[in-house]
């Protein structure tokens, strides 16, 4: 299973020739436009930096190898009164489970933790302002205890919203030895991969992403 970070909160997940895209964006400061091809698109909520489905061209379509569950949460800590609802998508295949937390804006309840269940990988917003901040993200990690954590939705000049915190605010909450800084924006997901926090390197879109 291959996971690729495309910037902001957007990821491509590939398995058995199937490609799905999560939270495609448009008009996020610094990031060039996305142009992708995929078999399916999942969006956490109806904001343009998370639901730009028009940047994804549908492929012919393969059989979806993933079991997909959606956990209802909120984009703020006022039960959606400020920014609405947020969907956490949980993807499972071959004993690997990946949760994309979307724009989670509050501490998880015990019921939500139980509904999400055990995770191999958690994709978690860490930039604050519109979502939980670094401490909130660490709290979510401690509640769910995934094998691997990948931060998203943060500012890394010149990319991203300048009012978001950078990823270092989150990383400093973890032991140095548990942090894996990647050379490139993709990684292979296995059920026995080393545990810790994985930080992909952002790579600007190219024609290779359109395949």
Image: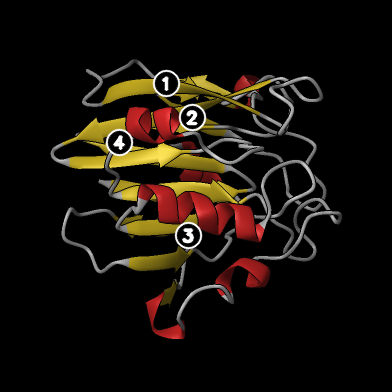
User: Residue 117 has which mark?
Assistant: 4
Residue 34 in picture, x, y percent from top left: 64, 38
Q: Residue at x 57, y 53 (%)?
A: 137
Cα–Cα span, label 3 and label 4: 26 Å
Cα–Cα span, label 4 and label 2: 12 Å
Cα–Cα span, label 1 and label 4: 12 Å
Name the residue beneath numbered marker 2. 88
Q: Is residue 43 above or below residue 193?
A: above
Q: Earlier in the sequence, mark 3 or mark 2?
A: 2
Residue depth check, mark 1 versus mark 4: number of the one nearer the observer: 4
Residue depth check, mark 1 versus mark 3: number of the one nearer the observer: 1
Name the residue beneath numbered marker 1. 70
Q: Residue at x 73, y 25 (%)?
A: 47
Outermost bottom residue:
177
Quadrant (top left/top right/bottom left/bottom right) for the C terminus: top left
From the viewer's perspective, tell me whether residue 179 is left or right of residue 7: left
At mark 4, the secondary structure is loop
Residue 14 in picture, x, y percent from top left: 31, 39
Q: Earlier in the sequence, mark 1 or mark 3?
A: 1
Name the residue beneath numbered marker 3. 185
Q: Is residue 35 above or below residue 83?
A: below
């Amino acid at each position: 299973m291959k996971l690729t970070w495309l910037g902001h909160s957007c990821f491509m997940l590939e398995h058995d020739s199937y490609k799905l895209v999560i939270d495609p964006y448009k008009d996020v400061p610094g990031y060039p436009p996305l142009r992708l091809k995929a078999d399916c698109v999942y969006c956490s909520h109806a904001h343009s930096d998370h639901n730009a489905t028009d940047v994804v061209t549908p492929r012919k379509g393969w059989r979806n190898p993933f079991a997909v569950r959606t956990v209802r949460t909120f984009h703020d800590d006022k039960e959606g009164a400020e920014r609405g609802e947020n969907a956490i998508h949980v993807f499972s295949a071959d004993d690997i489970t990946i949760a994309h937390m979307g724009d989670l804006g509050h501490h998880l309840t015990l019921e939500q933790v139980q509904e999400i269940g055990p995770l191999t990988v958690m994709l978690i917003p860490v930039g604050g302002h519109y979502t939980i901040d670094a401490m909130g993200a660490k709290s979510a990690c401690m509640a769910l205890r995934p094998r691997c954590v990948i931060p998203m939705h943060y500012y890394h000049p010149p990319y991203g919203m300048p009012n978001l915190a950078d990823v270092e605010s989150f990383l400093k909450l973890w032991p140095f030895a548990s942090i894996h800084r990647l050379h490139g924006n993709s990684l292979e997901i296995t059920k026995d991969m080393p545990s810790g926090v994985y930080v992909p390197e952002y790579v600007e879109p190219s024609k290779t992403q359109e395949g």
